[in-house]
Image: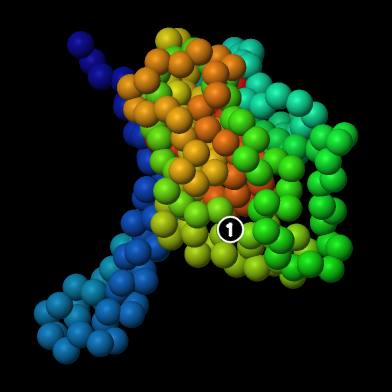
Amino acid sequence: MASDPNGIVNRLIRAIYRGRGVLLFVSIIAIFTGTIGAQFVPFVPLMRVLSVLPVVGILGMLLVLAVVIPGVKLLPQWQPLTVTPPITGRWMALNSPATRVPSHGVRAYGQTHAVDLVFDPEDRVRPEFGTGIVLRYPTDYPAFGEPVRAMIDGVVVRVTDSQRDHRARASLVGFGYMMVEGTIREFGGPRFIVGNYITIRGDDGVFALVAHVKQRSAIVRVGDRVTAGQTIGACGNSGNSSEPHVHAQLMDRASPWTGHECR
């Protein structure tokens, strides 16, 4: 049976596109290690190896750029999915696909159609942005500590809630600080961007992730069976977050490294 060259190429492009986060991460480390290491290593053979790493890293980044556009077109198409909201009460949807796609400006970490939900109850005041306070305690926000619920029926496959809840970036100065901080967080991979998170695998193969969960608030563990609407943790301000909120997304893989959106 003759092989299909186009099919092989398409599979390769899809594979690189799926793993582009890992490839970019490795490329950046290679550039950084080679550039800095070559300046301090006195051993000539090792110095020569290190001097090649930046070139390898740049080639890796160029490869990622080359597959971005064709990779998006080759992703499997999902039918619209209906899920249970991960919160109850009066919440506002920010950074949602209702206004733009990708909703967060990038397609990384499976967040192309992700939604940020901010609690704005009628009986409590949500601090306004830019009121003179650069950094606010997360406890100043009504969302902090609110229950977070499962969006789908399924099995818990990922739970991490060890990261601290930092102060909210409550002004332009604080937001600028978050932008710089977010760049640094990228070196740690998706976990340092989404913060504490819980992922559930649905029976239909969809993975539902809620992020920025409060530290030590997860009440489920890997392997637990949950139902939609069941409380699984609490809203926090971990990861790359400007204020306590719930980040929700659906993916076709368990890992934000290789998962892509399920609309």
Q: Quadrant of residue 104?
A: top right
Nearest to the observer: residue 66 or residue 239: 239
Callout 1 secondary element: loop
Dot 1, how many residues are within 10 Å of its Cα: few (below 14), some (14-19), or many (20+)?
some
Pick the quarter of the image with the N terminus.
Answer: top left
Q: Is residue 63 left or right of residue 148?
A: left
Query: Visible in this render: residue 255?
Result: yes
Q: Is residue 65 left or right of residue 4?
A: right
Q: Looking at the image, which residue is at 12% across and 79% down?
A: 45
Q: Quadrant of residue 154?
A: top left
**Picture coordinates of residue 13, whole percent (x, y):** 40, 35
**Picture coordinates of residue 141, whole percent (x, y):** 73, 48
Q: Is residue 154 left or right of residue 144?
A: left
Query: Visible in this render: residue 251?
Result: no
Q: Quadrant of residue 56?
A: bottom left
| Residue under pointer 1 | 166
**Picture coordinates of residue 216, whole percent (x, y):** 46, 43
